[in-house]
Amino acid sequence: MYGSAEWRARGLLRSEEIARVVLGTAGHIDHGKTALVRALTGVDADRLAEEQSRGMTIDLGFAPLELDGRAVGVVDVPGHERFVKNMVAGATGIDLVLLVVAADDGVMPQTREHLEILSLLGLERGVVAVTKVDRPGVDDDLLAALDAELDVLLAGTFLAPAPRVRVSALTGAGVPALRAVLAREVGRVEQRPVRGPFRMPVQRVFSVKGFGTVLTGIPLSGVVAPGDGLAVHTQRGAVLRARVRGIQAYGRPVERARAGHSAALNFVDVDRKAVVRGDVVAHPDVFASGELWEVRLESLASCARAFDRRINTVRVHLGTAEVMGEVALLEGSELAPGEAGFAQLRLRTAVVAAPGDRFVVRRHSPLETLGGGVILGRSAWRLKAGRPFVLERLARREATLGDLEAQALLALEDARGALAPGSAELLAVSTSLGQPLTTFVGALQSLVDDGRAARARDGRFVTLAEGARLDQEHRELQAQLLERLARAHASVPTRPGQTLTELRRLFEGVEEPRLAAALGALLDRGGGGGEPPV
């Protein structure tokens, strides 16, 4: 479906031949990113005719890189400021960055902006390539000056300790050394875990005659295999059901795609025109899109001015999507450059996200990267600023990121202390966390098993406080039943008792499950069986 003929000819790509690591380029326009990718991989990542004619990368390019016998995906991103949105889309899902700086040009505006964006997206490892060392005028003094400039630029960032390699894509000088460094760094990257439901933001959409629609991207979690049924969440609000016909990774067919692979999924029942970049392919009934998101927002120190309490119209980059929206601060009157605080994203288009996802915020006009942050959860309504209980809950949400049981306990408290199995509310909570319903119910049951939550007699999961309240109500209802039966017996001693219909009439304001549980407990106690706990 795509990829070089040489790779396609090699047949099925086995899982052990693929590193669950994706390498992404970054850097200013015309600093030689695409030429360097071509020197490393033999693949021209400029796939569009316009890119090749203009000599610049406009959209995302992909290439397979073989290091020590294992395939690594390479995402080549544009460096021009007008195409930063494509750069952010390409940076979603990468694990290792190759920051490219031309020796004859030095640090430039997009060098700085790309570094800021990568930091906002949570990148932790990378390599710096100093390119075009073969250019006239590039000597030891210039290279030493560039090293000093890089020291200042990278100080305090995740790339401060990154190895630097001097290369020329034209002559090949330094390319073998760069391959060796990349192989070492790929081995040090913690590969993405394959646990969890499958989710892949869509980067490219195209069709192949005789095959159908192909959706490409980098899975963020999970595994998918041919024959699996998936859901395509579109930004138009539709959820399309589709079945995977075939899968390729790095231009070769694979038996499955995992988190951290650059993958292409072939569908026969999806209209190519119905899907665009920014849509999300995922396991069915696990995720749901939303327009309101609670976040921890960080303002870049380089911002000209702060976010303030007024509605801030912005472009939000989340996954591979770019949508318009507003930022509403929830604490303080402003968010000064370099500061962080709780906020709510109010998007004009619904998107799919999960707690822990990273996002970038850019000014609507003129274009400028303002900041970014991390998704804490989906909101059911617009939040008001300065509410202590809201800020306390957001702080707890932030503290529970990555801990499903802690998230389940917080969700249980938010749901008025109880969640009923099979309820729409329970499903809504599980999808807001991006968890299969069975997994979320398992987390709730683990809380019960650990004594951190309880299970009511009607099967609901409840907090310990709610469980205690229900237990007290249960005991009071038993006492009322006994009192009523005693009064009835005293008034008519010859009568054996009251019928169930009479009791239901007397306690018609009590829900049937509660009444039945109280009567059952009295019968058990009367028989010496003891009273079951809540």
Image: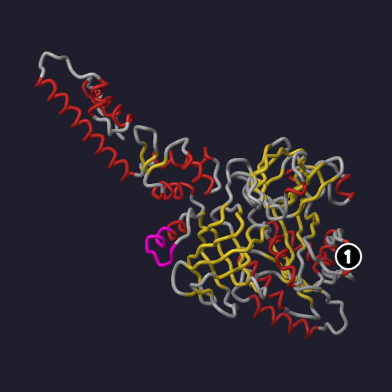
Residue at image point 87% right, 64% down: 50
Which residue in the protein does label 1 denote? 52
Residue 436, image quadrant: top right
Q: Which residues are magenta?
A: 384-393
Q: Residues within 10 Å of mark 1 (few under 14, many from 20)?
A: some
In the rendered view, would you say 531 is above or below 251? above
As helix, strand or loop, the secondary structure at mark 1 comes to helix
- Residue 389 inside the magenta-drawn segment: yes
Q: Nearer the viewer, residue 69 or 322?
A: 322
* Residue 523 left/right relative to 50: left
* Residue 131 left/right relative to 302: right
In the rendered view, would you say 452 is above or below 300? above
Give coordinates of residue 420: x percent, y percent.
Answer: 42, 38
* Residue 534 left/right relative to 155: left
- Residue 142 inside the magenta-drawn segment: no
Magenta stretch prevailing secondary structure? helix
Q: Nearer the viewer, residue 352 or 157?
A: 352
Residue type at mark 1? Answer: Gln
